[in-house]
Amino acid sequence: MEPTAPMIRRTLMLGALLTLAQAADAQTNAPLVEAARRGDLPQVRALLRAGTDVEQRDADGRTAVLAATAGQHLEVVRELIARGANVNAQDHQRDSAFLLAGARGYTEIVRATLAAGADLKSTNRYGGTALIPACHYGHVETVRLLLTTAIDVNHVNNLGWTGLLEAVILGDGGPAHTEIVRLLLAHGADPALADREGVTPLAHARRRGQREVADLLARHAAVPVPSRR
């Protein structure tokens, strides 16, 4: 029997109701994560005082400190860290509070996670450290902070790109990305590290008409030829 329009509507409605019920159930089963997501500091404190596990996870594997980071709720992040939250705990998408804060340019949250033992070698679902997406998105102050640590400035992600390559390939050549390229070079980024096709950051910059970036890279790569006398 062919489904009628009313049958299809009922099926869709039941599906929608089931989705809402599942979402509500996830929130009920992870009240600390939900309070952190909202940035509700009094509720977070009340739940922790009542003995709620600071590492509670929701249906997506997110901890409260990750949910608070996603909402850029700095004070909630600090409260959870003070209560022992693991800033390296990753959800089903391999985001952690440290990695997500780096990718979004939440510099003060990055600072808080670093003080709480952020794993500089941890990687996201693309195999990149916190530094690489910060370079990609032009988060100058976040990059500046991360470069004060021992993070690997020449780490290569699953795409075959370093932070320097991402700053050029995915950047716009404007002031932010130009400053990031300068910072990376000053902290040991290797301009000779090419992508999987053998294209260097300098070649990418020239192809994209990023003149200031290309000039920086060219000057950095220029090495005087030793005298043979």
Image (cartoon, rainbow, N blue to C red):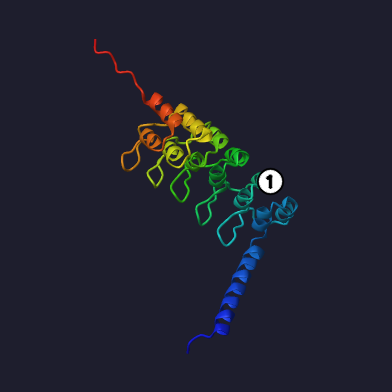
Give x and y (percent) for residue 176.
53, 34
Snapshot quadrant of residue 117: top right
Quadrant of the snapshot with the C terminus: top left
Label 1 sits on a secondary structure element that is helix
Image spot of residue 203 (x, y percent): 36, 35
Relative height, residue 138 to residue 3 (above, below) = above
Residue 57 higher or lower than 208, as above or below: below
Of all residues, the one furthest to the top in this rendering is 229
Residue 193 relative to residue 78: left or right: left
> Dot 1: within a 10 Å radius of its alpha carbon, few (fewer than 14), some, or many (20 or more) residues?
some
Instruction: Residue at the far bottom: name it.
Output: 1
Which residue sits at x=45%, y=38%? 163
Image position of 218 with respect to 71: above or below: above
Closer to the camera in the image, 25 or 72: 72
User: Considering depth in this image, is 207 or 52 the residue closer to the camera?
Assistant: 207
Number of callouts: 1
Task: Identify residue type, mark 1.
Answer: Glu
Residue pictured at 73% horizontal, 57% vertical: 50
Q: Locate residue 119, reporting x and y percent.
A: 51, 42
Is residue 194 left or right of 51 when viewed as pictured? left
Seen from the viewer's position, the closer of residues 132 and 155 is 132
Residue found at the far left of this picture: 229
Q: Position of residue 57 (x, y in %)?
A: 59, 58
Residue highlighted by disc 1: 79
Residue located 55% across and 83% down the image: 5
- Asked if 17 appears above or below 114 in the picture, the reply is below
